[in-house]
Image (spheres, rainbow, N blue to C red):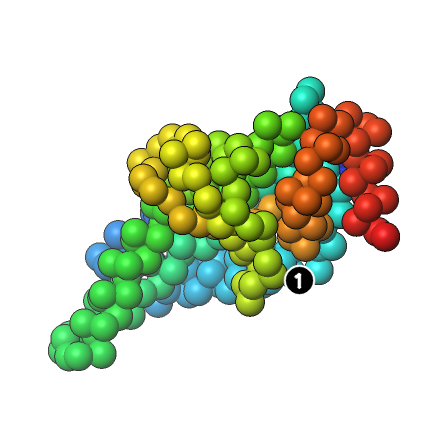
Amino acid sequence: MSQGANGDDNLGRRNAWLYYVLVGGAGIVLWPLNIVLHNELWPQAVTLVLCLGNAVAYIAATLRTRRPRTLSVRPGAFEAPPSYLRLALQAAGMPLAVALLFSVVYDDDDWGVYTWMLFAAAVAAIYLTGHSLAMLIRGTGRLTLRPDGLTVVDATVTHDVPWEAILSGPLPTVFGMGRVGILWPELVTSRGLGRKKNLQRIALQLQPSAVDREFLHSAINHYLNQPEERAAIGTAEGLRQLQAAEAA
C-alpha cells in the first residue's frame, strides 16, 4: 500500500474533526456574540483573527502540499482518499465567515442596500456552512476504482458507475474538477439526497482529493481505453502497471 496516497487515514480524520470542533465551534459561538455585542470590539477582533488564520492555513495547505501520484490498494479496489485537512479547513472557515458578516451587518444602525446585500451574503454563507460540514462528514472527494466500475463521493450523493455506462473520460478543466460523460444513465446507481435520474455527466469532485487530480484523470482514462487491465485493479502489480503507463 502506498503511504503517500494513504496519508489521510483515520488519524488524519480525527485531527481534522478536532480542528473543526475547536475552530468551527468557535465560529458558531461567535455568531450570537457578534450580534448581541455588536458595539463591542473584541468579538469582531477575535472573529477576524480566526478567519484570517484559517484562510492562510487553507491557502498554504492547497498550494504548498504536493499531492502524490499514486493510489491506496484496497481489496479489489484502488482508492483515492479525500484530504480531510482541506475539508476541515473549508468547513471551519464558513462559521467564521458568517460571524464576521453578522458583525458588520448588525454594526450598521441604518440598513441600506449595502447592509441588505451583506445580510443576504450571510444567509448564503449559512447554507454553505451546512454544505461544507456535509462534505467533511461524507469525505467528499473520495474516488474508488474497481474492476467493474468506479465510485464517486459527493457532498450529498454517492455514484456507483459501471465502466460500461461511461461515454467519455474526464478532461482537465479550469478548476481541476473533471467530469465523466454518461452513455447509459440507467446503469448508474446513486444514493443520497442529491441523486438524479438520467444523468448525462458526473462531476468527480476532486478538489479536496489527497491524490493528484491529473493522475486520477489519467487513471480513469487508462482503464476506459484498456479494459483488459481492469482485472488487475486492487493489486500491487496493477498499481505498478498503472503508474508505468501514466509515466510513459
Point out residue 150 in the picture as x, y percentages from the top left corner. Answer: 57, 34
Who's the residue at 55% across and 50% down the image? Answer: 168
Residue 1 vs residue 126, the one in the foreground: 1
Residue 67 vs residue 100, the one in the foreground: 67
Q: Which residue is mark 1?
A: 63
Q: Work out which quarter of the rendered image holds the N terminus and state it.
A: top right
Residue 120 vs residue 104, the one in the foreground: 120
Point out residue 94 in the picture as x, y percentages from the top left corner. Answer: 40, 54
Who's the residue at 79% across and 49% down the image? Answer: 246
Point out residue 166 in the picture as x, y percentages from the top left corner. Answer: 52, 42
Who's the residue at 63% across and 34% down the image? Answer: 145
Is residue 170 shown to the viewer in this render?
Answer: yes
Residue 155 lies, with reference to residue 217, above or below; the image says above
Left-right relation of 180 to 156:
right
Residue 122 lies, with reference to residue 200, above or below; the image says below
Quarter where residue 43 is shown = bottom left
Who's the residue at 84% across and 51% down the image? Answer: 247
Secondary element type, mark 1: helix
Point out residue 153 in the picture as x, y percentages from the top left corner. Answer: 49, 38
Circle 1: residue type: Leu
Is residue 89 shown to the viewer in this render?
Answer: no
